[in-house]
Amino acid sequence: MRRFLFILCCTALLSAQTLRQAGAQRALLIGAAADATDANPDPLVKEPLYASTLETQYSMLEPENAMKWASIHPAQTRYNFQPGDELVAFAQAHQMQTRGHNLCWWSYNPAWVTNLAATATPATMASVFQDHINTVVTHYKGQVFAWDVVNEALSDSQPAGGIALKDSIWYNQPGIGATGTGYVEQAFRWAHAADPNALLFYNEYSVEAPGAKFNAMLAMVKDFVARGVPINGVGLQMHIGITGSPSSAGLAQNIQQLTALGLQVHITEMDVKLPVDSSGVASAADLQSQAQTYQRILTVCLQNPGCTAFQTWGFTDKHSWIPGSYPGFGAALPFDASYQAKPAVASMIGAMQTVPPVLNAAALVNAASYKGGAVAPGELVTLFQANYGPGSLVGAQLDSNGLVSSNLAGTQMFFDGIAAPSIYALAGQVSAVVPYGVSSKQQTVVQYEYNGVLSNTATLPVVPSAPAIFALDASGSGPGIVLNQDLSLNTSSNPAAGGSVIAVLATGGGTVQGGATDGALAPGAGNQTLPVTATIGNVTETAVYAGPAPGEVNGVMQVNLTVPTGLTGAQPLILIVGGVSSQSGITVAIK
Ligand code: 9MR
């Protein structure tokens, strides 16, 4: 009986989700460093539990060694792509992302290149460096979504206000002929040239807590961002223990200073080493502390949406660098040496299921123009960065009253407590219609919810109108969603004739005369309360009709306009509702 109760208790408490599934609901990549044929024996092939744990629990992998210089470029004229290719193929077969590591490091360079450095000129080193970056990034173009371009360039001790770099063959022994952080910059520029779509990261250790080394790194990347060096993010390695690990507040402060520059942050190499006995076993108490440490660091990442990936340096204690480098320590990863989940796994899943989603007021924008700052009644809005929601896209649904449902797969957006009709939902991006009830207000309190977990609130001003025309490619500009008089879509190859009537689809027109029900599909009649005019080219037009778009959810506005004669080609199209203009950059095609 007691045993039965125990099972009941713990089955109910344990999450049915994997790390990967929980991460998908947070728009967060959950990664692990992985080995293939570069390790002997190849765990990916030789150990079924290695492969199955990796693909069920993780949405991202990073070759722990296979893409490093010494592995991938063992001789000057020979590249060995096989182990890296094996990992990329595994990732692709399991819909995982591959994170590349690394293109430049002071350590783990092959003998041929360190030997060369002893006598070569900087010009020769630069040419070898460029060839390597270009060859490796080109080989994995479109397959590696993010690269650690430069790893660990900074010295451990830093001069006040300055940036000290570690000695390396790429910097000063003899280096590639660039001064200061110039070699780091050059690596980013060459990587970007080889794959302009890859995200490029600077990766570093001992920069998780505030301090001189973090300040030096911040100064370096701030300078890069200011001068347009192609850098997209910073990797915080996070090799820590259960004591002396960075405080939550300090880590949050560092992440915020990086994301304020427009950079992403990835936690790239987390492990939490524990003292172990001669069999590699840690105490139960330490395993609990370790679980709390994983949970605490992951929580800070979830609280800061610019933290977009959370990766551990391996995933099973069977394959970890810790015992070899720290004698007497080990058991650092979320799964034990038999691939059983340690307490850390449940604590990480628990964080992902319970940490409130973040509502960033600046990330609530018009669904057609992506302009933010204020909302209008009936406006279709999109909330980005709401980092808790369905792992895959869910489209609008009608409720039993025939209204567009305000609870879509567990997501809800509230304006002064009124649930907004939901257009679509996906972790990190949800869209809804601002309830008409805000029209009498100066401002509205917005809140987001997923599976019963509420976000913080944000207060936004309410304006009578915030017009915006939907773009055909949903980019906010370019050809608008416009129907020609025969109801065919207006495009450059199907332009409208002068004198014909077109229908423009937009939102943010404000209230409708006689009122409109939140979430109802429009019957095809009614007029906007505010006056609607337009310009096509430089010609001002009055609206033939301006009101709800028939069959669409209330909030989508249709404006019928007569096409002026004498204009041809893609002409600028602007709607003016209550004196407020829609975004610039939308066009209509005229013949
Ligand atoms: O875990 C890696 C180990 O297997 C390698 O022998 C070693 C040298 O290539 O690199 C280890 O990974 C390091 C990573 O590449 C950079 N940050 C520190 C990691 C642990 O040393």
Image (spheres, helix red, strand yellow):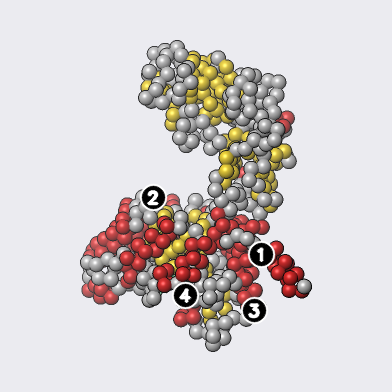
**Quick one: SS at disc 3?**
helix
Three-letter residue code for mark 2: Asn
Residue pictured at 54% horizontal, 87% vertical: 278
Whether residue 254 can be seen here: no
Whether residue 182 sits left or right of residue 234 in the image: it is left
Measured along the vertical axis of the image, is residue 450 above or below residue 325?
above
Q: Disc 1 or disc 2, which is closer to the eye? A: 1
Return the residue at label 2. 197
Q: Earlier in the sequence, mark 1 or mark 2?
A: 1
Q: Position of residue 219 (x, y in %)?
A: 47, 59
**How far is mark 4 from mark 1, CA to CA?**
26 Å
Return the residue at label 1. 14
Whether residue 311 sits left or right of residue 443 in the image: it is left
Q: Earlier in the sequence, mark 4 or mark 1?
A: 1
Return the residue at label 3. 284
**How far is mark 3 from mark 4, CA to CA?**
21 Å
Measured along the vertical axis of the image, is residue 417 above or below residue 301?
above
Three-letter residue code for mark 4: His
Return the residue at label 4. 319
**Quick one: SS at disc 4?**
loop
Three-letter residue code for mark 1: Leu
Furthest toward the right, the residue is 1
Q: Position of residue 424 (x, y in %)?
A: 58, 40
Q: Disc 2 or disc 4, which is closer to the eye? A: 4
> What quarter of the picture does the N terminus occupy?
bottom right
Q: Position of residue 312 (x, y in %)?
A: 51, 67
Residue pictured at 52% horizontal, 76% vertical: 337
Q: Residues within 10 Å of mark 2 (few under 14, many from 20)?
A: few
Residue 59 numbered mark, or none: none
